[in-house]
């Protein structure tokens, strides 16, 4: 009986030690001035949503500079762009989609796949990240046009494009904050 109590006490002590020495995700936050700078410029309708996107990645909670915020936002946008390309590729396997819709969806998969190459951290250090992001936005806009012309009306498609647009907006605002620092 004493051995069991000792084990429980030992694990409780370790848990207490870890909780006191490692910040939780709610304690580790991006500095408020960086969040304000990025989210004030974002086209996302809600400040809270912008903050949610900025803190969606655990590593984004440990940043301390505008450049690090932008790097994380670009990384998340790149991942969301890859996800969108894969989403459209998977959608092509559905049997209930007509030929015109399939052509538009296939085009979207290809356009998002091309966009992945535009969103990179190299642009941030080279000062071209905002142009790179706009190239990705142009591809997404072309995708939307093709879907509209083919009369594709699938809720999951609309949701995916909206999600991508939100991440794009946050990444674009973060990059803008780095490329156009306040005096």
Image (cartoon, rainbow, N blue to C red):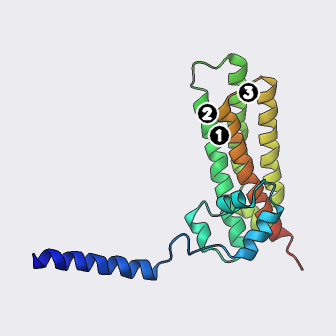
Q: Which residue is mark 1?
A: 85
Residue depicted at x 78% and y 53%? 45
The quadrant of the image that shows the N terminus is: bottom left
- Few, some or many residues within 10 Å of mark 1 (<14, 14–19, 20+): many
- Counting labels gives 3
At mark 3, the secondary structure is: helix
At mark 1, the secondary structure is: helix
Instruction: Measuring from the top left, give residue 39's x and y in whole percent.
Output: 77, 64
Q: Which residue is mark 3?
A: 104
Q: Which residue is mark 2?
A: 89
- Few, some or many residues within 10 Å of mark 3 (<14, 14–19, 20+): many
Q: Does the rendering let one see residue 128?
A: no
Determine whether 99 is above or below 122 in the image: above
- Tell me the distance, in whole angstroms, between the alpha carbons under discs 1 and 2: 6 Å
Instruction: Measuring from the top left, give residue 159's x and y in whole percent.
Output: 68, 39
Instruction: Measuring from the top left, give residue 143's x and y in whole percent.
Output: 77, 35
Residue depicted at x 81% and y 65%? 40
Image mark for residue 111 = none
Q: Are marks 1 and 2 in contact (CB under 8 Å)?
A: yes
Q: Say which of 134 and 22 sits in front.
A: 22
Determine whether 176 is above or below 46 in the image: below
Residue depicted at x 40% and y 78%? 18
């Amino acid at each position: 009986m004493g051995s069991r109590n000792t084990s429980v006490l030992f694990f409780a002590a370790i848990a207490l030690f870890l909780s006191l020495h490692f910040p939780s995700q709610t304690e580790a936050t991006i500095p408020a001035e960086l969040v304000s700078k990025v989210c004030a410029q974002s086209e996302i309708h809600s400040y809270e949503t912008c903050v949610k996107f900025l803190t969606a990645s655990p590593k984004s909670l440990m940043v301390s500079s505008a450049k690090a915020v932008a790097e994380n936002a670009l990384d998340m946008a790149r991942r969301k762009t890859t996800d969108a390309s894969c989403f459209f590729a998977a959608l092509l396997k559905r049997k209930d989609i007509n030929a015109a819709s399939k052509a538009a969806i296939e085009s979207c998969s290809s356009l998002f796949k091309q966009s992945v190459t535009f969103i990179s951290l190299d642009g941030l250090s080279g000062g071209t990240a905002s142009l790179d992001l706009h190239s990705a936005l142009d591809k997404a806009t072309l995708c939307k046009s093709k879907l509209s012309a083919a009369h594709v009306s699938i809720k999951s498609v609309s949701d995916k494009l909206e999600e991508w647009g939100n991440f794009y907006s946050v990444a674009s605002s973060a990059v803008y904050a780095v490329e156009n620092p306040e005096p």
